Amino acid sequence: MISETKAIRITRAKESKLKGQNLAELKFGSQFTDHMFVADYVNGAWQVPDILPYENISLDPATSFIHYGQSIFEGLKAHKSENGDTFLFRPKSNWMRMNHSAERLCMQPIPEELFMEGMLQLLNVDRDWIPSGDSSSIYVRPFMFGTEAFLGVRPSSSYRFMVILSPSGSYYAKPVKVKIETEYARAMTGGVGSAKTSGNYAASLFPASLGQKKGFDQLIWTDAKNHEKIEESGTMNVMFVVDGKLITPKLSSSILAGITRDSVITIAREKGIAVEQRDVFVSEIISAIKSGTLTEAFGVGTAATIAHIESIGYQGDILELNPIANRTISPFIEKYLNDYKRGRIEDKYGWLVKV
Ligand code: COI
């Protein structure tokens, strides 16, 4: 619990927006619950945090993050089990990654207790919003931005850490068509690609929009220097099954260390599937598709969960992959992970935190 002096103040919304919502039919990230968590870091200290009715926030036009991008976020989900318990999935990993992002962006680290209690108490206040059913969950979005009103280029001296909740369905409603991007880049060696910072997503929008005009749902990013090595897919990490082995790009300064990525690797190893984390070359993936040794390709992410890839575009060609119905490894891991998150199997890795 947050120490007594820092106990979270709770101001409840006068009226809930929940009435009339259909929690079974929600698009990703489009509805928000009744409350939000807010904690300010000012004058060298975290102030008493608040849970407030969800509302607009007011900012000085010179607020530093608007101009220079000190803005980081996380994404995690809480799931309901059949007996009505709710479990957050791997929140400590999100806390650690958020502070990795904070360090890279020269921002104030967030104490573990503030991060965990802020989320847990907010989920508790808005627990009626947590949907049940295997394809729904509540998406938790912690984020932090520099709040000092100052136009010089230097780290902000004050920060706001917030959490909002969005009851959500799947990010991708069906298997995805992706394009291997060989002109634009999301991140480069030594850059901020391993941080979950807003600018990485902004950088992806224009190339992604060009891909969407050609009918692709997403891009697969390649290394910024030569576009020879596969990196990630923007909203998710990417994995392939070739000759029965699970292959995924090894982590680097230009790839986000996905928590779902780590969970999938852990489960695959537990089930005796060989896993290779290494440089993955575009050329080997294209040859493996053509020779039929590549049997599965999928994205892994919190929002996306397991997003099956049905086709890959490369240099003007569309390569159709093995039909989803013929795949074995990714559907197995998808089900196992879903059961794990909902407390249907033993929590052997200590990944679940009860709300
Ligand atoms: C997530 O999977 O949580 C993400 O942050 C990806 C995307 C929705 C931005």
Image: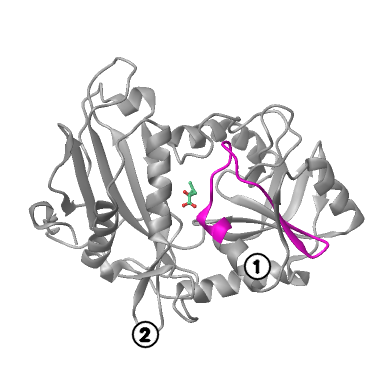
Q: Answer yes or no: do the residues labelled 2 and 1 have beta carbons within 8 Å? A: no
Q: Quadrant of residue 41?
A: top left
Q: Residue at left 56%, top 36%?
A: 253
Which type of secondary structure does the marked residue at label 1 adopt? helix
Q: Nearer the viewer, residue 126 or 341?
A: 341
Residue 175, x across and y down, in percent: 66, 59
Mark 2: few/some/many CA within 10 Å (<14, 14-19, 20+): few
State the extent of the magenta-drawn residues as a range.
Answer: 240-262
Q: Earlier in the sequence, mark 2 or mark 1?
A: 2
Q: Is residue 216 above or below residue 146?
A: below
Looking at the rendered image, the quarter that the N terminus falls into is bottom left
Residue ID for mark 2: 83
Residue 255, x across and y down, in percent: 58, 41
Residue 225, x across and y down, in percent: 70, 26
Q: Is residue 163 above or below residue 296?
A: above
Which type of secondary structure does the marked residue at label 2 adopt? loop
Ligand 1 neighbours mark 2 (CB distance < 8 Å):
no
Q: Residue at left 16%, top 49%?
A: 49
Looking at the rendered image, the quarter that the C terminus falls into is bottom left
Q: Quadrant of residue 11?
A: bottom left
| Kind of residue at badge 1 | Arg
On whether residue 260 falls in the magenta region, the answer is yes
Q: Residue at left 64%, top 41%?
A: 212
Nearest-to-viewer mark from 2 and 1? 1
The label on residue 346 is none
Q: Is residue 143 above or below residue 89?
A: above
